Image (cartoon, grey):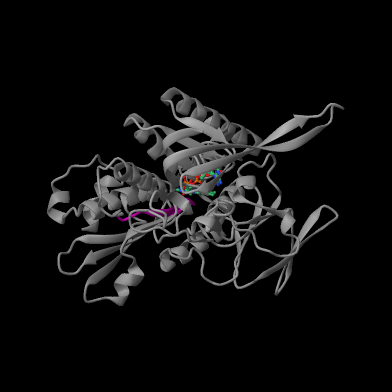
Amino acid sequence: MEHFDVAIIGAGPACLSLAYDLKAAGKTVAVVEENLFGGTCPNAGCDPKKILFAAEQARSQVAQLIGKGFAKNSLPSVIWSDLMAYKKTYTDPVSKEQIAGFDASGIKHFHGHGQLISANEVAVTVQQENVLDNDTQSMVEKKQCFTAEQIVLATGQRARLLDIPGKEHFLTSTDFLALEKLPAKMIFLGAGYISFELAAIANACGAEVTILHHNDTPLRGFDQDLAQHLVKELEKSGITFVFNENIQSVKKDDGKLFVTTDKKSYQTNSVVCATGRIANVENLGLEDLGIEASGRGITVDDHLQTSQKNIYAMGDCVAKNQPKMTPVASFEGRYLKQLLLGETTEKINYPEVPTSVFTLPTLAQVGVSSSTAEKDPANYKVQWFDMSKWYNYFRTNDPVAFAKIIYNKDSGEIVGAATLNQKADEWINLMTLIINLGIKKEQLQNIIMAYPSVGSDLQYYY
Ligand SMILES: Cc1cc2nc3c(=O)[nH]c(=O)nc-3n(C[C@H](O)[C@H](O)[C@H](O)COP(=O)(O)OP(=O)(O)OC[C@H]3O[C@@H](n4cnc5c(N)ncnc54)[C@H](O)[C@@H]3O)c2cc1C
């Protein structure tokens, strides 16, 4: 049986940052992937989504400047099929390129479902077509097994679909990002970041969009004042929000879909279920090895180690409090590289992680939240900024630009930041630097930023 120093199950961003580094350090490495190499982010997550977002962004920039340089009838319409064709030029090669990268580096890759047989043995189940004598075909399962000194689980998450009558009609975010034709009417279930982002894309591309949520709190975990402002802005752009309704069923009749809640019935052409994500922990052989796991993920200690001392887990499949996002998965991959190579014995120590909702305007936050700060006025001060009239937002005629900055009361340092503005993705990265590096007012004043830009505004927040 083939033997490796390290085997990684799941070839998403967490795996990639670890596999190449281990190989470069002289380890023998095996990677098992049952779907597309590269994982969720480049195939059906962050990257394709932000390609579609670029169309939303460009259209919105023109819309804001109509009467300010653009003619009344100059609002461009998005041609969905062209946009998707462009997206595919990015996504289609990802898996093949990843495999080529592994081959070039000498990383052994297996395509199939990975499962732990023992603490050191992995079985990969591959579905293969079997052509019979009478020329008919059937699928057969083939198993390949190998052993490894250390095993890292990086199996990610998938959409959690509501278990209601008619659930077979649901589309997932993955289906949405591969739609050949944009439906005329769409309902998005759930008011989390994925629902907001995909609904805003569909709306900008011409669909009639509703977001339906079971309670009155959209974007749980995000600053609620800013989230409410975002809802208002998205309503102005044409999205309908329905709060406090519980979906009960989806029915198909005469080619149309009918969504019934505890209060009403809605007719639509498609229903995207974005009510959360669940860790891929089934059929991994965890139970037999006594490794604890739930829908939240695999239980690990602060060295990302499971209850089996040579088996680790990283990325979205881990039960953790940090956001389940690509840069966090890559950070964990980099940490495990150091741990497995004996370069550290320290616990994993996460920096403050920014989170964003890529809509227009974009909502983003990092560090101490305003809700934590408001409960602890002895230690924190919260300041609200309305930047709508500031030059950077005026020049593009942005409708709103708000921020909340949280300061440590003793030191005066910025320890948290949240914003709703169209340039928030880079804004929040600059705040992430300030907070993680503990950059003080005097230090910031000694840095000259390119003007005019989001960076040159930073001094105004101190
Ligand atoms: C629509 C959407 C938008 C997103 N947008 C953003 C964003 O803007 N920014 C951001 O930071 N994050 C975003 N994310 C989250 C991001 O995609 C994930 O955090 C990231 O991909 C996690 O990496 P991972 O390696 O842990 O898991 P994944 O990328 O999910 O990779 C896990 C891999 O394991 C494979 N696998 C599972 N079980 C097995 C098995 N038993 N055997 C073999 N293979 C297996 C899966 O097929 C998958 O390829 C988004 C996610 C979605 C769905």
**Percent x, y of residue 363:** 43, 56
Classified by dominant secondary structure, the portion drawn in magenta counts as loop
Which image quadrant for residue 259?
bottom right
At a point 54% along the width and 28% down the height, the residue shown is 96
**For the view shown, which residue lies furthest in the top direction?**
104
| Total labels drawn | 0
With 441 as the anchor, is 453 left or right in this view? right
Furthest residue toward front: 1
On the image, the x and y values in percent for residue 99 come to 51, 29
Q: Judge whether residue 356 is colored magenta.
A: yes
Q: Residue at x 19, y 61 (%)?
A: 413
116 or 49, which lies in front?
A: 116
Query: In the visual, does 338 lie left or right of 425?
Result: left
* In the image, residue 344 above or below residue 318: above
Quadrant hosting residue 52 = top right
Residue 286 seen in the current view: yes
Residue 224 placement (x, y as % from top left)? 43, 68
**Residue 71 in view, yes or no:** no
Looking at the image, which is closer to me, 241 or 460?
241
The quadrant of the image that shows the C terminus is: bottom left
**Residue 201 place in picture, x, y as percent:** 57, 48
Q: Quadrant of residue 340?
A: top left
Between residue 405 and residue 103, name the one nearer to us.
103
Residue at position x 75%, y 60% in the image: 166
Q: Nearer the viewer, residue 461 or 192?
A: 192
31 magenta-colored: no
Q: Residue at x 33, y 71 (%)?
A: 372
Q: Which residues are magenta?
A: 351-362
